[in-house]
Amino acid sequence: METKILRGGRVIDPASGTEVVADVVVRGGQVSAVSPVPVLVPDATVIDVSGCVVGPGIVDLHSHVHSIAGQRLQAFDGVTTNLDLEAGLMPVGRAYAQAAAAGRVLNYGFSASWAEARGQVLTGAVPTARFDGALALLGNPDWQRDSSPAELAQWLDLLERELAAGALGIGVLQGYAPRSDPAEYLAVARLAGATGAPTFTHVRELVEADPSTPIDGSREVTIAAAETGAAMHHCHVNSTSRRHVDRVLATLQDARDQGSRVTVEAYPYGMGSTGIGASFLAPDRLRVSGLQPANIVMLGTGERILDERRLAELRALDPAATCLVEYLDERDEADRQRLHRTLAFPDAIIASDAMPVEWPDHRTDSRAWPLPVGASTHPRTAGTFARTLRLMVREHAVWDWVEAFRRCSYLPARVLDDVAPAMRKKGILSAGAGADIVVLDPAAVTDRATAADPVRPSSGVRHLLVGGVFVIRDGRLDQDAYPGRAVRAEVR
């Protein structure tokens, strides 16, 4: 079994809160030692990482990237484990099998899909374990209605079966069925509490934006957590809260202070992305969010939508077509500060909401590197974590490196400790930890992806190991490396 030694870097272990110059010894898929004294092992591969920051690989709880192309972009952003937990895929067994058969650069995993379970029961839509299928469903109003008692029991049973098949929790796209009965959300939380599974929610609209909402989206999460004891994760609080984010964060903090199991995530962009058919992008609903059609840009073509007529036309033409949504203006100082306060919120987890990589010829993946010309996605796919490190560590000095890895690696891994044994060795860097490791040049780490050039990889990742295997070495991608392994929940 080959031994690798990362020699003389600034080793960060967010679990113990320590930073020490040390050797990291990797044997197989595990860290066998972290030693401040140089380690001598005959025939070991020794890599000099002096001057670099060495930390546990980033754990992304919210990534819709299910492709080699997308995972390679995320690797250059420091990610070693990417999980689709907000939306999930169904059937989850097929999703795991498809990923394993194709090979994966990064570790991967999925939640049970609330939307697709409802879609199957309420509309007869057959899930395909593909994200594009889920996007197409979101534009169909039939699955967004209230369920009868029999229908509710049916799709809850589907979710429970998915949990038994290894799903890492329940992904709830509540914001895409915003008028559905809150009692149904509470039923999902009861299922989660009874099975010990976490939930991951894209919340419905806030009361400030839509006083007619059946319940304030963020309060719904905290109420369900308090009533059921379930672990409730609030997805991308930056994009769903927009200019009301300070009130929402206070609501979540009150719930945590009262003992509820509520976690929260954010990403460092004022621009989101989704399918153009999403209910909240309907012309009559867009104003509720304080947005105009011109705040929406179609991915790939770059078309900025000029009026409601064109918006309705595009929604009818292809509701699954990906768009970018400008919900905050990053040129505005007040909006930049809102985004900054969201990232700085105590224990806020960084998660990308990474989107699939697309091409004009409709291909969905490529093993070629660099990526073939014409690829597009939201820049957060390639740049979320490097951008966060640039802003919070390098430029504003709000976090040190220990706190940065706590937010990007340690805290997200802990969300899944109770359900997934594999996660208990992630997000830490000490003897016995899994050998998912990122080595950064602290002066060079930065995002390079933009809306105009969204697939430009981040810079500053010198080495990246997944399960002890180099995916990136000396800043270069190993195109033959597919060491990613499934992260599954244990059967209860």
Image (tube, rainbow, N blue to C red):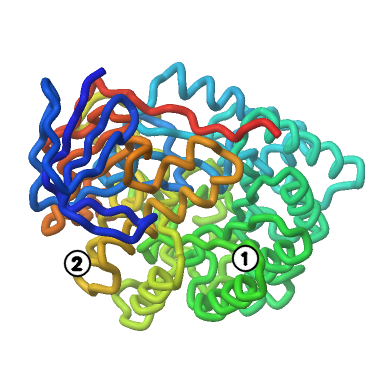
Kindly indicate whether the residue at mark 2 contacts the one at mark 1 (C-beta within 8 angstroms). Answer: no
Cα separation between marks 1 and 2: 39 Å
Q: Residue at x 66, y 45 (%)?
A: 197
Q: Position of residue 138 (x, y in %)?
A: 62, 45
Location of residue 488 (image quadrant): top right
Q: Taking 470 as reference, is 423 above or below it?
A: below
In-image side of 359 versus 135 (left or right): left
Residue at image mark 1: 285
Q: Residue at x 19, y 71 (%)?
A: 395
Q: Residue at x 49, y 35 (%)?
A: 422
In-image side of 328 versus 199 (left or right): left
Location of residue 195 (image quadrant): top right
Q: Position of residue 144 (x, y in %)?
A: 73, 50
Quarter of the figure that contains the N terminus: top left
Q: Residues within 10 Å of mark 1 (few under 14, many from 20)?
A: few
Q: Residue furthest bottom?
A: 334
Q: So how many labels did they put on this image? A: 2
- In the rendering, which numbered label is found on residue 65? none
Tell me the SS state at disc 2.
helix
Q: Position of residue 227 (x, y in %)?
A: 78, 64
Q: Nearer the viewer, residue 130 or 23?
A: 23
Residue at image mark 2: 394
Tell me the SS state at disc 1.
helix
Of the two numbered discs 1 and 2 on the same chain, state the one appearing first in sequence: 1
Identify residue type, mark 2.
Arg
Q: Residues within 10 Å of mark 2 (few under 14, many from 20)?
A: some
